[in-house]
């Protein structure tokens, strides 16, 4: 068991499985296919990110440094939340980027989404957490790898 403390962007409590990307996640490339198809479950569709490609992301804790890519990234995050196929949590090792922040705020305000977002968890977080680990997330920004 190891615990990390980050900054709460959008709080919440959850015990969920982790999906880890050691590289930035391109929101458009990762979720566009699921949004266009109005899928019931989102699978990573970015062939350039082997950590998330073809991996189920709905309801998981997406652990990543930051999001990358086009300026549509925020709207894509808002859309996956509108479709209720979003990761339950976005856990950033670095400070949250403006695209992800805008999407999470839009999803919270427009879609009444309960998506969790915590940033500044640190490099050690991404070095420690593995895909498939169970994480306990607390409202105060504490993330424990169980």
Image (cartoon, helix red, strand yellow):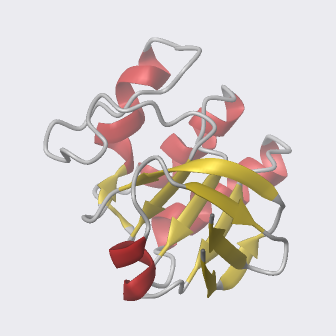
Left or right of 123 on screen, residue 48: left
Q: Quadrant of residue 125?
A: bottom left
Residue in front for this viewpoint, 38 or 70: 38
Where is the N terminus found, in terms of image quarters? bottom right
Q: Is residue 75 above or below residue 90?
A: above
Across and down, in percent, residue 82 comes to 70, 32
Across and down, in percent, residue 136 comes to 72, 62
Of all residues, the one furthest to the left in this rendering is: 48
Residue sitting at x 73%, y 65%:
137
Q: Is residue 29 above or below residue 146?
A: above
Across and down, in percent, residue 66 comes to 39, 70
Residue in front for this viewpoint, 10 or 12: 12
Residue sitting at x 67%, y 86%:
7
Q: Say how many tags the image has.
A: 0
Residue in front for this viewpoint, 2 or 41: 2
Of all residues, the one furthest to the front in this rendering is: 1
Q: Is residue 9 above or below residue 57?
A: below
Q: Quadrant of residue 43?
A: top left
Residue sitting at x 13%, y 44%:
48
Across and down, in percent, residue 102 comes to 60, 63
Residue sitting at x 54%, y 20%:
41
């Amino acid at each position: 068991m190891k615990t990390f403390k980050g900054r709460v962007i959008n709080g919440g409590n959850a015990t969920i499985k982790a999906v880890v990307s050691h590289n930035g996640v391109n929101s458009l490339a990762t979720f566009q296919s699921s949004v266009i198809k109005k899928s019931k479950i989102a699978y990573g569709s970015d062939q350039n990110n082997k950590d998330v490609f073809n991996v189920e992301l709905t309801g998981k804790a997406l652990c990543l440094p930051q999001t990358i890519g086009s300026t549509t990234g925020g709207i894509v995050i808002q859309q996956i939340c509108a479709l209720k196929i979003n990761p339950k949590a976005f856990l950033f090792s670095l400070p949250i980027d403006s695209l992800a922040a805008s999407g999470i705020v839009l999803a919270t305000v427009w879609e009444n989404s309960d998506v969790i977002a915590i940033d500044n968890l640190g490099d050690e977080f991404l070095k420690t957490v593995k895909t498939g680990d169970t994480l306990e997330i607390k409202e105060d920004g504490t993330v424990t790898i169980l």
